[in-house]
Image (cartoon, rainbow, N blue to C red):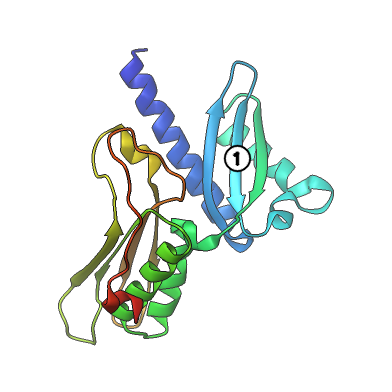
Amino acid sequence: MTIERKFIDNSVAKLNISRYLSKELTRAGFSRVEIQKTPMLTRITVYVLNPGRVIGRAGHTIDTLTENIKTKFKVENPQINVMEVENKMLEPVLVAKDITEKLERGLNSRKIIQFALKTIVQNGALGAEIIASGKLKAKGAKKSSVRKSLGYIPKAGNVTELVREGSAVAYPKYGAIGVKVRIVPPGTVFPDREIKPLEIPKAILNA
């Protein structure tokens, strides 16, 4: 197996495991997963809002998840570590889900996005981007998109691995709306540039 093929296979496996855990741990407030393979085991670190729901009584839930990952995805010696999310406003999946819930309640999409963007940056993010696309307006309107960003969000190269990404879909009565969130967490160091403190525009600050 070539290095390129192995890299692709590992990426696909991580994506599939992430999708599986996202579905199984929705009620636990699933945010993201990190996978590290060592000679002895595969360490899977899951970030959630409620670790107790992942562990379960006497560890039953986490044991079941471990066994399912081992059999479904052919992972050798998986070990699941559960970490509690420290700040949900720095977790793209949780931010995206919060936005979709508000969209389903019929709130103004631009104001929701501006408020979320402001809150993310106020919690220390060095950069943030939110994109919403779909039926953003009333019945009969065409599909459209809204994109708002603050700070530095790299779009190419290895540095993109330093950016957290997440998405969710809202289903208001007029049609589906996809929401994608990118966040550069506090303390991120980029090798090619120095990130200056962010100034929030008044339009977003007053959202």
In the image, what residue occupies the spot 17% across and 85% down? 140
Question: Which residue is farthest left?
Answer: 142
Q: Residue 38 falls in which quadrant of the image?
A: top right
| Residue 204: image location, x then y, percent | 31, 75
Name the residue type under label 1.
Thr
| Residue 123: image location, x then y, percent | 48, 62
What quarter of the picture does the C terminus occupy? bottom left
Label 1 CA crowd tier, 10 Å (few <14, some 14–19, many 20+): some
Image side of residue 89 versus residue 203, left or right: right
Q: In this view, does 6 lie above or below 105?
A: above
In the image, what residue occupies the spot 27% across and 45% down? 154
In the image, what residue occupies the spot 32% across and 40% down? 160
Which is nearer the eye, 73 or 192? 192
Q: Residue 87 falls in which quadrant of the image?
A: bottom right
Can the viewer see residue 60?
yes
Question: Which residue is farthest right?
Answer: 58
- Number of marks drawn: 1
| Residue 66: image location, x then y, percent | 67, 38
Q: Mark 1 points at which residue?
A: 45
Question: Which residue is farthest top?
Answer: 1
What quarter of the picture does the N terminus occupy? top left
| Residue 68: image location, x then y, percent | 63, 39
Q: Residue 95 falls in which quadrant of the image?
A: bottom left
Can the viewer see residue 74?
no
Image side of residue 42 versus residue 11, left or right: right
Could you say whether the residue bearing mark 1 is in a helix, strand or loop? strand
In the image, what residue occupies the spot 27% across and 78% down? 203
